[in-house]
Image: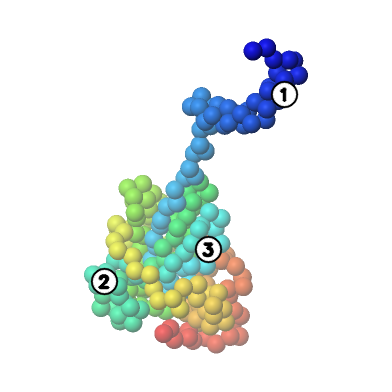
Amino acid sequence: MNRSPKSLGLAALFFSLFFSPFIATYAGSSSEEETVPPRASQELAVATFAGGCFWCMEPPFDRIEGVVSTTSGYSGGHKENPTYHEVSSGGTGHAEVVQVVYDPSKVRYAELLDVFWHNIDPTARDRQFCDAGHQYRSGVFYHTPEQEHLAEESKSKLEASGRFGSEIATQIEAASAFWPAEEYHQDYYMKNPLRYKYYRHGCGRDARLEKLWGGAPSGTSSSESVSATQPASPERRH
């Protein structure tokens, strides 16, 4: 059957309006047109450090770009899910620790180690500042062979420097089960800033760190310290 040019034009318009989108969709779904999905961002990593009172170990790491979170808790012991009072009594073998989650593409583990060393007294054995007992020992709990190597290397360099004139007491051991501390301990320096400052000052932490390392502790700010006119005795921790 013969069709007029007009009818052929209408048929072409109808086909274009109703079938072209389907053809484009089919063509776009072919393997040749598929786009390669973007690569997933590098996975986060975990670091665990013991530096005495975990209240005082969160702030230095929280201020480091690339650190995603810090959590106060307990590690290195033999009891499951210990409480603060059990750990602080010294009967569980745990140390107060801070677990740091970080982005390795933004901050290197070696940098975290540097912050750690500059916020502890590496010469003190089974204590840190005014807190005494094995639960307040300083230590690096490594999660990978690379972390172990870097921790041992940094400790060796510190010992070789001879700056302290005594043995480095900080322990380096494999990470074991980590138990988050009670909620009221988390971000204590932000929840209770005045009580935190009084405790930190009374414990002599900043004075000792300045004597050991010179200047303000790495990763801290002047707002964490209180003047010498504030109470000299550390507030009791509960």
Question: Amino acid under label 3?
Answer: Asp
Question: Amino acid under label 1?
Answer: Leu
Decide: few, some or many residues near mark 3? Use Cα within 10 Å; few <14, some 14-19, many ≥20.
some
Per the image, the residue denoted by label 1 is 10
Per the image, the residue denoted by label 2 is 80
Quarter of the figure with residue 163: bottom left
128 and 16: which one is in front?
16
Q: Is residue 30 visible?
A: yes
238 and 232: which one is in front?
238
In the rendered image, residue 78, in percent from the top left (x then y), is placed at: 23, 70
Per the image, the residue denoted by label 3 is 62
Which residue extends farthest left?
78
> Going 56% across and 66% down the picture, which residue do you hit?
220
> Going 56% across and 62% down the picture, which residue do you hit?
63
> Going 34% across and 69% down the picture, which residue do you hit?
179
**Disc 1 element:** helix
